Amino acid sequence: MKSISIIGAGPAGIEAASILAQQGIAVTLFEKSSSAMKNVADKTFLFPDFAAASDIVEAMNKKLLNSNITLHCDTEIVALEREGKTSWKLTDAKGMSYYSDLVLIATGYTPFDAHRKEELGYGIYNGVVTSLDMEKMIRYDKIVNSLGEKPRRVVFLQCVGSRDEKSGNHYCSKICCVTAVKQAIELKRCLPDTEAYVFYMDLRMWGQHFEELYRQAQQEYGIRFVRGRISEASGTFDGRVQIKAEDTLMGLPLRMTTDLLVLMVGMEASEGTRCLGKACGIGGEYGFVQSKDPHLNDTATDQEGIFVCGTCKRPMSINDSINDARSAAVTILQAIQ
Ligand SMILES: Cc1cc2nc3c(=O)[nH]c(=O)nc-3n(C[C@H](O)[C@H](O)[C@H](O)COP(=O)(O)OP(=O)(O)OC[C@H]3O[C@@H](n4cnc5c(N)ncnc54)[C@H](O)[C@@H]3O)c2cc1C
Ligand code: SF4
């Protein structure tokens, strides 16, 4: 029987491990954090249906209770190299080595670091937060401005670190349009009197129920959508944030003051994705890993014995990552037959 290692215990890695384990195949799963699912556990409610992130984490963790799965947490795989003709050697950050015939890379994404967009004031003005900070505010029912008071106005800004020349990420992160709509609705549910604005380049409501959510945001909650890009944010003497933007529909420059500016950060390849992709020769654009063929074979790679799934390839939602992992599991089952 061939040995199988999976790197990354997010939705994709766990789903693939679970499918293989159900087929009676032993799988070793490596996770660099102290627990699985950390990139979902830091969310509160999920689009498109406001499911509790904690329920999804619990359901995925249950899948790990199969005796065919051995999970090593606190184990960051930092090197991946060929061992002989058919095997791979994995080395962790503590210098321990593991050997495996087949390796599935599911090392996922990292959120864009908003400090890199200095002109938007993250880390400089307390009234500028990211979508991940907003998730926490919603979870603890503590949506407050920089003075700890209820905000009168909240502005959400799309495409931070995606579709952006300056940060070098030309791709669309796919999940942030619907996340902004979801968070704006959550804001209005918590604080109905607070004004909510979403500044967008164009709204990409590609998934099932996304468009309905967008309509609901406008019609039921009175959330205002402005087609335009914010070029600069600065602080005011009373702790608010002033934004400079252009309304690209009206062709007019615009200034606005807000209590909170929420930066909708995109997804970048995680450090693990970048490092392991490079190590085994499947590193692709923007640090994501590259599959063999995006149409016909999207979970195998040009390296025999190496497979890929989930957001280590490109931005995806949770259900797309899980579906992709199922596809990877089938590809692996075919490879070991
Ligand atoms: C602000 C924001 C909000 C979002 N909201 C939603 C939502 O509401 N609904 C939705 O469907 N999706 C949402 N997403 C997207 C969702 O988080 C991803 O689709 C999902 O987490 C991808 O799963 P994955 O397994 O591919 O990657 P990840 O969840 O990133 O999992 C990869 C795992 O690999 C581990 N790892 C990385 N490198 C190594 C290494 N070298 N060795 C060992 N382990 C390693 C990581 O620690 C991580 O646990 C959101 C994303 C963002 C940024
Ligand atoms: S999903 Fe929306 S906010 Fe995110 S990068 Fe794409 S267009 Fe911009």
Image (tube, rainbow, N blue to C red):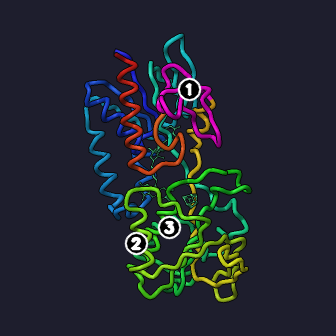
Q: Secondary structure at mark 3?
A: helix
Q: Where is residue 96? Give x, y as percent.
A: 51, 27
Question: With respect to residue 114, does 91 lie above or below?
Answer: above
Q: Secondary structure at mark 2?
A: loop
In terms of image quadrants, where is residue 95? top right
Determine which of the numbered discs, if any, sits on residue 80 in the image. 1
Q: Nearer the viewer, mark 2 or mark 3?
A: 3
Q: Main secondary structure of the magenta part?
A: loop
Residue type at the position of mark 1 = Leu
Q: Secondary structure at mark 1?
A: strand
Q: Quadrant of ligand 2?
A: bottom right
Residue type at the position of mark 2 = Tyr
Residue 63 is inside the magenta segment: no
Q: CA distance from mark 1 to mark 2?
A: 40 Å
Residue at the image position 57 percent from the left and 77 percent from the top = 155
Q: CA distance from mark 2 to mark 3?
A: 18 Å
Residue type at the position of mark 3 = Ala
In terms of image quadrants, where is residue 9? top left
Q: Quadrant of the C terminus?
A: top left
Q: Quadrant of the N terminus?
A: top left
Determine which of the numbered discs, if any, sits on residue 64 in the image. none
Cβ atoms at labels 3 and 1 below 8 Å apart: no
Residue at the image position 47 percent from the left and 20 percent from the top = 99
Residue at the image position 43 percent from the left and 75 percent from the top = 217
Part of the protein shown in magenta? 279-307
Mark found first going from the N terminus, 2 or 3: 2
**How many residues crowd mark 1 within 10 Å: few (<14), some (14–19), many (20+)?**
many
Extreme residue in the top direction: 85
Which residue, given by chain and number where applicable, does mark 3 sit on? 180
Q: CA distance from mark 3 to mark 1?
A: 37 Å
